[in-house]
Image (cartoon, grey):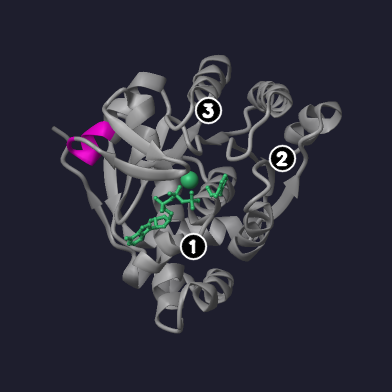
Amino acid sequence: MDSQKIADELSAVRSCHPLVHHITNTVTINDCANITLCTGAAPVMAAALEEAGEMAAMAGALVLNIGTLSSAQVESMLIAGKAANACGIPIILDPVGAGATAMRTEACERLLAELNIAVLKGNAGEIGVLAGAGGEVRGVDSAGCAGDLAAVAAACARKYGTVVVMTGPEDYISDGERTFVVGNGNPLMARLSGTGCMTASVVGAFAAAGTDLVVSSVAACAAFGRAGERAAAQARGPYSFRTALFDEMANLMEEDLAAHADVKKADTI
Ligand SMILES: Nc1ncnc2c1ncn2[C@@H]1O[C@H](COP(=O)(O)OP(=O)(O)OP(=O)(O)O)[C@@H](O)[C@H]1O
Ligand SMILES: Cc1ncsc1CCO
Ligand SMILES: [Mg+2]
């Protein structure tokens, strides 16, 4: 994929400054709000049944994250999701911990069945579970996924008719036909809770501003990963890395992204 195209997607977020509505977990909610701002978009967190639909209808993207789900929150997600679908607003689903408990797996399957999900973004274990491809999840962490990861991402995309973003040391982005692998990022990202949740926020901001969900999702992963690379160069450990990650996302130059985006087409078996 053309590196300039990836940088142009970041420019689009900054000029469009889209509103990204989140219904998300209580662990990383503040990080999601701030990474959305640092990307160039505007976050709003609104989970009450009474307002979730109204808020979704005025957003540029809706991010649903089941990290600390409750039955009531699933109902809010369905109301917000139906409003978003009615307005053509892309929905990003983060299936946090799918496969760890039946409640999480069933909630994801219900959201995927009742809503038109634009991007399903999870770690390799979560995507492997939802694909039915032998993913393993411990708590909210991937415990691995059997087989070729690019092929699992593509199969999952075909199964649900969505774009899949599978994160890890490399990120795989697929709509079932086109599959890309993004190499940007740093191992320190896995030593901090919530970088996966933040990836969904960034993917949401790029989806709101872009036109092709595969291109916008690839660009989002490259931009966030590149911010991680730049942050790691300044960090003494996970928490100084965290501060630098927000700063580097906010300061990321389009020229730097165009020069350093590490994106390749993936071979799927
Ligand atoms: N070893 C690594 N090297 C480079 N980048 C990584 C590595 N591990 C994770 N990342 C990056 O960190 C981000 C989060 O990915 P990860 O798969 O760890 O999410 P997650 O398990 O859902 O995280 P969380 O549940 O804490 O939100 C992605 O942007 C991914 O590219
Ligand atoms: C640790 C944790 N537990 C539920 S959600 C969450 C944030 C990272 O996924
Ligand atoms: Mg996650």
Answer above or below: position of 38 versus 32: below
Instruction: Give the magenta-colored segment's residue range.
Output: 147-152
168 left or right of 62? left
Mark pair 3, 1: CA separation = 22 Å
The residue type indicated by label 2 comes to Ala
Ligand 1 within 8 angstroms of badge 1 C-beta: yes
The residue type indicated by label 1 comes to Leu
Question: Where is mark 3, residue-wise?
Answer: 104
Taking the image as drawn, is residue 177 in sight?
no
- The answer to whether residue 148 is magenta is yes
Question: Where is mark 2, residue-wise?
Answer: 59
- Looking at the image, which residue is at 65% across and 42% down? 24
- The answer to whether the residue labelled 2 contacts the one labelled 3, judged by CB atoms less than 8 Å apart, is no
Answer above or below: position of 140 versus 8: above
- Looking at the image, which residue is at 28% across and 42% down? 144
Question: Where is mark 1, residue-wise?
Answer: 192
Taking the image as drawn, is residue 120 in sight?
yes
Mark pair 1, 2: CA separation = 28 Å
Q: Nearer the viewer, residue 128 or 223?
A: 128
- Looking at the image, which residue is at 51% across and 19% down? 106
Helix, strand or loop at mark 3:
helix
Callout 1: 10 Å neighbours few (<14), some, many (20+)?
some
